[in-house]
Image: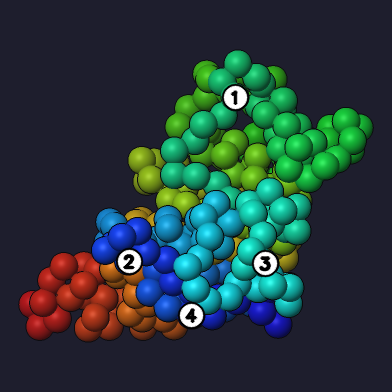
Amino acid sequence: MAILSLRKVSKRYGAIVVADAIDLSVGDGEALGIIGPNGAGKTSLFNLIAGTVSADSGAIAFEDRDVTTLGAARRCQLGISRSFQIPHPFSGLTVFENIVVGAAFGDGKSEREAYGKAAEVLELTGLAAKANVVAGALTLLDRKRLEMARALATGPRLLLLDEIAGGLSEHECRDLVATILALRETGISIVWIEHIVHALLAVVDRLMVIDFGRKIGEGEPRTVMASREVNEIYLGVEANA
């Protein structure tokens, strides 16, 4: 069963088309990876799914409910949550307090419920030992973990990860992949935009490629990566090179 579906979703800003009649479906418990060159429209697609911006045309459904006209706050309440490329935690709050904010305001939990949810998310994201550390003192890896933890604290059924591995070392990237694989065991559906392709290939079931707002390929990850269009458009090399 599809937990998320987009049908002919389009968005443009003047002459710039960031989503060109995009069709997309994500299964319950599935992990979908999205790749494409800089400026291809990947983050714009996330904005459309999360409700940060409205589509010009097309339809978006979440768990068989039409959410096309709903804003970001309502979609979050229904179970769509996202991380951002650049983490912006509440620097003066502890890791635990940051996650409590997500649980209390993103999921409408009471204080007691928020504490319980925060403790659960700390364990799930590998941040338990950093619970009382002020967020402004975290390493980049732990800020990335916290960004993901705050999204998880809202209790999503669908988690959108926007280039969460960017800027990490190889070792840090492996640690993050292990965390995301553990998340998959909870049954959550994931859509992950990433430039670090080997990280995606370790996690996702399916890969989609977009360029200039158009979907140019989709399917089994390694088959997609070997395709002519991906080599020519995404990798920027001729297919016979």
Between the C-alphas of marks 4 and 3, the distance is: 14 Å
**Real-space Cα separation, disc 2 to disc 4, in angstroms:** 13 Å
Residues 66 and 35: in front is 66
Q: Which residue in the structure is indicated by mark 3?
A: 67
Q: What residue is shown at x 44% (from left), y 44% (from top)?
A: 85
CA–CA distance in space, label 4 to label 1: 37 Å
Q: Which residue is mark 4?
A: 8
- Residue closer to the observer: 219 or 65: 65
Q: Amino acid at mark 2?
A: Val
Mark 3 vs mark 1, CA separation in Å: 29 Å
Quadrant in the picture for the N terminus: bottom right
131 left or right of 31 in image? right
Query: Eyeballing the image, is 229 above or below 237?
Result: below
94 versus 56 height, above or below: above
Give x and y (percent) for residue 201: 43, 67
SS type, badge 4: strand
Which residue in the structure is indicated by mark 2? 17
